[in-house]
Every structure is written in C-alpha cells, then in structure tokens.
Amino acid sequence: VMAGDSSDSDCPEHLKQYRAYKRKQQQKRSARQQPPPPPPPSDHPTSLLGSIADHPLTSPLLKLLIWLCGLLFFAHYEFGSVYFLASIPVVVWCSMEEWKRGPGELSAYSVFNKNLERLDGQFTSEQWEKELRYGAASLQRS
C-alpha cells in the first residue's frame, strides 16, 4: 500500500491511476513470489561437531577401534608410548563432555560453578581457619 492512499480524493486523476497501477503491480509480484516455507525445526545442533557427535557411527566401539589403529600405527614407528600418554588428556576432556549437569545443578567443585558457588555443608578453608583459631564452638550458629 502506497503512502498517501487515504487522500486519493484530493489528488489529480492521473495520480490516482498511477497509484492503482502500482498497487496492481505489487499484488502481481507478491502473488508470483511467495516466500519459501521455513525449514522444519531440527533437534540437531547446527555446528559441525554437534552433527558429528550425533552420528550413529560414533559409537564407543568405533572410537576404540580408531584409537587402537592409531596406537598400532605409532607403535610401529616407536611412538606408541607418546601416543598413549597424549591420548590420556583427550580421553579426560571427552569424558567431561558426556557428563553434562542439568540446569541449576551444582558441581561438587566450586571452581566449576557460576560465581564459585559452594554446595550446602561444604567444608571450606574459612571454616577450617575459624576452627583452628576459635575452636569448634565458633562455628555453631545462634
């Protein structure tokens, strides 16, 4: 809809015809060019690593076989122990990805929690210091 269409009665005839012509052209264009339908929602992440992790071929057995092939390859060139030692941090890192915490769930280690939040009842260095200086009675809440 063109701006100023509400006051067509005040416009000259040729301007009214021009606006009507433009409206028809715009309607024809919009009828011909329907926007493509939106893509269906996907449960899979859009990142490459997320799509690889969800692939059925990434079973633990396949991962073990690939690791063993790498170990045999490097052992052949006498770097088997280096390969084994280098794979330990990789295994630790990958295992941390599998054990995601739920929303609002805290880690037992406060350094991994938002704002270093501690669990209720967690023994802290401040508590230990108070006990050493003032005795165990200093920790009782009144």
Image (cartoon, helix red, strand yellow):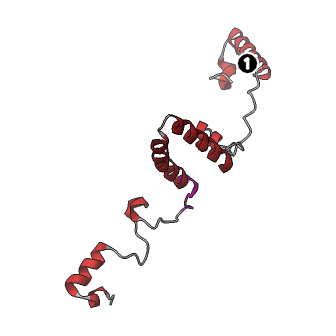
Does residue 49 belong to the magenta stretch?
no
Left or right side of 131 for 104: right
Q: Amino acid at mark 1?
A: Gln
Q: Nearer the viewer, residue 57 or 126?
A: 57
Q: Is residue 59 visible?
A: no
Q: How many marks?
A: 1
Q: Which residue is mark 1?
A: 26
For this orientation, the residue located farthest to the left is 133
Location of residue 134 in the rendering, given as x and y in whole percent from the top left corner = 21, 86
Q: Nearer the viewer, residue 129 or 86?
A: 86
Q: Nearer the viewer, residue 56 or 6?
A: 56
Does residue 101 belong to the magenta stretch?
yes
Q: Secondary structure at mark 1?
A: helix
Residue drawn at (71%, 15%) of the image: 22
Instruction: Please report the bounds of the magenta region as a residue range.
Output: 97-103
The image quarter containing residue 73 is top right
Count residues near mark 1 (Cα–Cα under 10 Å), then give few for <14, some for 14-19, many for 20+. Answer: some
